[in-house]
Image (cartoon, rainbow, N blue to C red):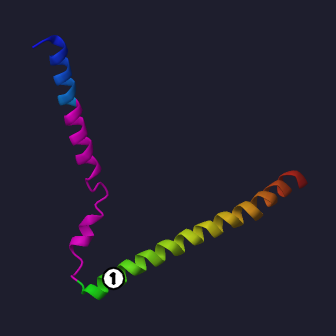
Amino acid sequence: MSLTNRVLNSAASATGKAAVGLARWATTDHINKGRPIQFIPSTSFIGALWNIFMELVMGIFCAVLTGAIAYVMIVYGIPLFFYLMFEY
């Protein structure tokens, strides 16, 4: 086996180990969010659909609320900041 083949095999092995390690790390629950889910009592199909629906509704509501807060801060906050900075 030539030096080039040994280097390539070594590099391929190291790359494969790094990829497996990265994938294992990426799919690990680092903040233990899955642990409380283990203790939730089982719900009916309709209850599960209701939970999914409420997650979607609250996600959309929170996104709209965040946008509204950002709008108010930009439209009213920046002019107020400049007014207070240069007026006094």
Give the residue at mark 1: 49
Q: Is residue 12 visible?
A: yes
Residue extending furthest toward the left: 1
Q: Nearer the viewer, residue 23 or 40?
A: 23
At label 1, which amino acid type do we have?
A: Leu
**Magenta region: which residues?**
15-42
Predominant secondary structure in magenta?
Answer: helix
- Quarter of the C terminus within the rendering: bottom right
- Residue 69's quadrant in the figure? bottom right
Task: State left or right for residue 68 relative to residue 27.
Answer: right
Crowding at mark 1 (Cα within 10 Å: few <14, some 14-19, many 20+): few
- Quarter of the N terminus within the rendering: top left
Q: Nearer the viewer, residue 19 or 82?
A: 19
Query: Which residue sits at x=26%, y=70%?
Result: 36
- Residue 63's quadrant in the figure? bottom right
Q: Is residue 88 visible?
A: no
Measured from the top left, where is residue 58 in percent x and y? 47, 76
Measured from the top left, where is residue 16 in percent x and y? 20, 35
Q: Nearer the viewer, residue 23 or 25?
A: 23
Whether residue 66 is situated above or below residue 24 in the rendered picture: below
Q: Is residue 36 magenta?
A: yes
